[in-house]
Amino acid sequence: MKKADLEHEDEAFGTKRKKGRKAASFFLFVIIVIAAAILLLWVIRRQQLREDMEQLLAGVIVDIDNGRYTAALNDAVQAWDLAERLRDNEYISEINARIRLIEEIIHADELFENESYQSAMDAYMLALRYAVETGNIATGYLAKMIATTERYIDFYDLIQDAETLVEHINYEEALSLYQQAVTVAATLSFADGKELAAAGIADVKERIELAKRSEAAQFILQGDWSLQNGFLAEAIVFFERALEIFRELDDSQGISLVSFRIGTAQSSLADSELQVEQEAQDGQQSNLDANPDATQEEAESNYEYNQRLIFDMRALIDDQYKRPANQVRMGSAGGRNEGWYNGCGWVSTYNALILLDDPCHPADIVRYFESSGGTVFGGVFGTYPHAIERYLKYLGYKVDHALFPRIPANIDDIIKASRVCIIAYAHTSAAHYIAVEYRQEDGRFIVYNDNLARNRSVSLGLDEVSSKGAVIDSVSAFINNTPEILFAFSLIRVSSRNQ
């Protein structure tokens, strides 16, 4: 090859090599530009993610400050996702702390709304610790809720303590706690709480009144016993104590009832020496009380009148306000001597005898009571329990008699073991006798001539020949749980006839 040709080839090769180098440099430049653009876009995107995350975190603070905890939680979760994408462990830790705080606040609020105040208090305290750890976020709200929750806990503690005191019959202290609970409820604008505490106050006041009435009734019973046995000065003391209670209760009926007894006792006390002297002169041995029953003329008149009343001797009396029971006369004509007013004693005796298959006309029962000192203040206040006991023994029955406070608690068991029982109880107006039997085949107690029991009874469908009475599951529960009944003061048990 010629020298000129070689030189020409070398020149061409050099030109190609220069062009190749230029192309490589251009491609490298393009790659660098693309890489720089990608890097720039990555930096911009990362910066955008960070700005979005920080904006979400700022929104979390705003939502918390405005009490929008569910929205705050949503924003925090989104911020956490961005922190994960940024692989920013510092932000991940910070956001986790806020999420934990918000979730605990929401949990505490739910417990509070569900009235689980003690659990809510524990949750709020835990949330407060988280709030302090995250830069005192929501500490103001938490402090307010902790104080409010504490007042609710105090309210229910007062209610519970008051109920415990009521169970232990410490009514005065219970009343004080209920009144404090009303004040706490008012500071909370807690309407249901005020209603609950007010109901407790009403219940305690009713219990206090019933307790006072029970105490007054006991004083009256003690006074009656003292009067019956001639301890007139002592009777006046008991009656005056009862009078103080009725005056405190502003009970005009009770005041009238006791005032009459005091007047009777005072009159009897003034006349007692004259009566003793007269009895000594006449040489009479009288079983009559200081205040006698009906006079002999009145008793004979009552007997003649009562004999003319027609009774179905198979039918139990279940309402002394109806004829002919309400027409039966007992005691002095100077008082209320008709069966509707003072007849529960002889009615219970009459019913008991029918249940014993040994009926007796009311005229004979009343005559016995009047002739044996068995009526209280000439019949004005009915019949003494001892008179019923003596009459049943007079007829030949085996009788056990317990008086308050020696009446056994297991009244139901006693009635089940008896053929029939007569119970006398004091109620908020006066006193009342009932006859009770136990029906083995039905497993129920039947109470006769008692409106209170009838209101709590169920129909047993007894024989139409007799009155249905009131059917109850427990006599003990009836006496102890009926608000109008104060206590039982006489339990006469008839088991069999003496041979």
Image (cartoon, rainbow, N blue to C red):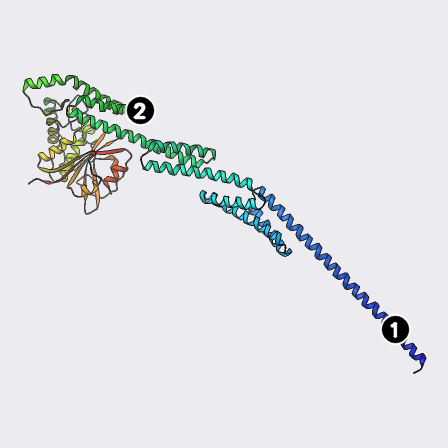
Where residue 44 appears, as percent x and y from the top left, is 71, 54
Query: What residue sits right under mark 1 in the picture?
Result: 14
Amino acid type, mark 2: Glu
In which quarter of the view is residue 222 placed?
top left
Circle 1 SS class: helix
- Camera sees residue 314: no
Q: Nearer the viewer, residue 443 or 458?
A: 443
Quadrant containing the N terminus in the rendered view:
bottom right
Q: Is residue 61 left or right of residue 214?
A: right
Q: Nearer the viewer, residue 231 or 250?
A: 231
Circle 2 SS class: helix
Q: Nearer the viewer, residue 46 or 447?
A: 46
Quadrant containing the C terminus in the rendered view:
top left
Which mark is nearer the camera, 1 or 2? 1
Q: Is residue 83 left or right of residue 345?
A: right
- Camera sees residue 441: yes
Query: What residue sits right under mark 2 in the picture?
Result: 248
